[in-house]
């Protein structure tokens, strides 16, 4: 079956612009997770949802980052007023006992 | 807090050599342990997992045993192939926590 998909795969933006990253989880998966991965590092947790409810957002670095999952399926991670330090790979996963990852979105802020 | 430590530096070895990548962890309670692999140009894939002490996870010739006494989950493969060249990440998930904590990853390069 279809795995986790993310779009866009690559995003280049200018400092100060807002970006929205999309995640489409595996069908039927209740839990959805967002991670951020800097070059040469492992992924770091940002936030996660069960159905449409955001259960834990303690990993979001500041209030420019937000996420939603309004219908309990597709999720959007939004970064407002992007900064160069936001450049990273953003990864989405779904599943519970085991998390299955999408291909990631490579964000570059110029 | 929960953390995972992987051995420093890339690993370069010849085809058919024995591979070991060390992983140790710090966590409250008894976490589940995972190895994920990232092949060039691809996303993170689950390689294997173990959910309790003394469990052995295995897949594609790779093995790792959950050692509670040494808080370790070392990854091994007896005879590597060029196609095993990838970045390998060790991770843990504490029961009831739902977030994965990853190590920094190890780049493995297998030379023909």
Image (tube, coloured by chain):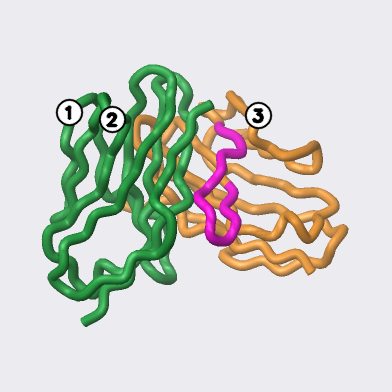
Chain colours: A orange, B green
Q: Nearer the viewer, mark 1 or mark 2?
A: 2
Left or right: residue A65 compared with residue A3: right
Q: Is residue A61 left or right of residue B83?
A: right
What's the magenta region? A36-48
Percent x, y of residue A83: 81, 56
Tags 1 and 3 in contact by the CB under 8 Å rule?
A: no
Disc on the earlier residue, 1 or 2:
1
Q: Residue at x 43, y 42 (%)?
A: B5
| Residue at x 52% of width, y 38% of height | A33
What percent of the width, then of the height, locates residue B82? 23, 75
Residue that carries the numbered disc 1 in the rendered image: B54
Name the residue beneath numbered marker 2: B70
The residue mark sitting in front, 1 or 3, is 1
Q: Are marks 3 and 2 in contact (CB under 8 Å)?
A: no
- Residue A13 in magenta stretch: no
Local secondary structure at mark 2: loop
Other-residue count near label 1 (Cα within 10 Å), few / some / many at <14 / 14–19 / ≥20: some
Instruction: Tell me which residue sits at (12%, 64%) in the image.
Output: B79
Q: Which mark is residue A58?
A: 3
Vertical arrangement, residue A83 with respect to residue B6, above or below: below
């Amino acid at each position: 079956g279809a795995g986790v998909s993310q779009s866009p795969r690559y995003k280049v933006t200018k400092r100060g612009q807002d970006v929205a990253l999309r995640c489409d989880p595996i069908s039927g998966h209740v839990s959805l997770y967002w991670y951020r991965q800097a070059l040469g590092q492992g992924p770091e947790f940002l936030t996660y949802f069960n159905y449409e409810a955001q259960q834990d957002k303690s990993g979001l670095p500041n209030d420019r980052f937000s996420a939603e999952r309004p219908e309990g399926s597709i999720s959007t991670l939004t970064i407002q007023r992007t900064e160069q330090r936001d450049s990273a790979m953003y990864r989405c996963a779904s599943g519970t006992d085991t998390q299955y990852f999408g291909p990631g979105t490579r964000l570059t802020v110029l | 807090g929960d953390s995972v430590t992987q051995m420093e530096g890339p690993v370069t070895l010849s085809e058919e050599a024995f591979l070991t990548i060390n992983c140790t962890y710090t966590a409250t309670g008894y976490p589940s342990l995972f190895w994920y692999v990232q092949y060039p140009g691809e996303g993170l894939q689950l390689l294997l997992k173990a959910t309790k002490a003394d469990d052995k996870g295995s897949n594609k010739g790779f093995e790792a045993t959950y050692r509670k006494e040494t808080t370790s989950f070392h990854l091994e493969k007896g005879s590597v192939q060029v196609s095993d060249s990838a970045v390998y990440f060790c991770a843990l998930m504490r029961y009831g926590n739902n977030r994965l904590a990853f190590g920094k990853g190890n780049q493995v390069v297998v030379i023909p």
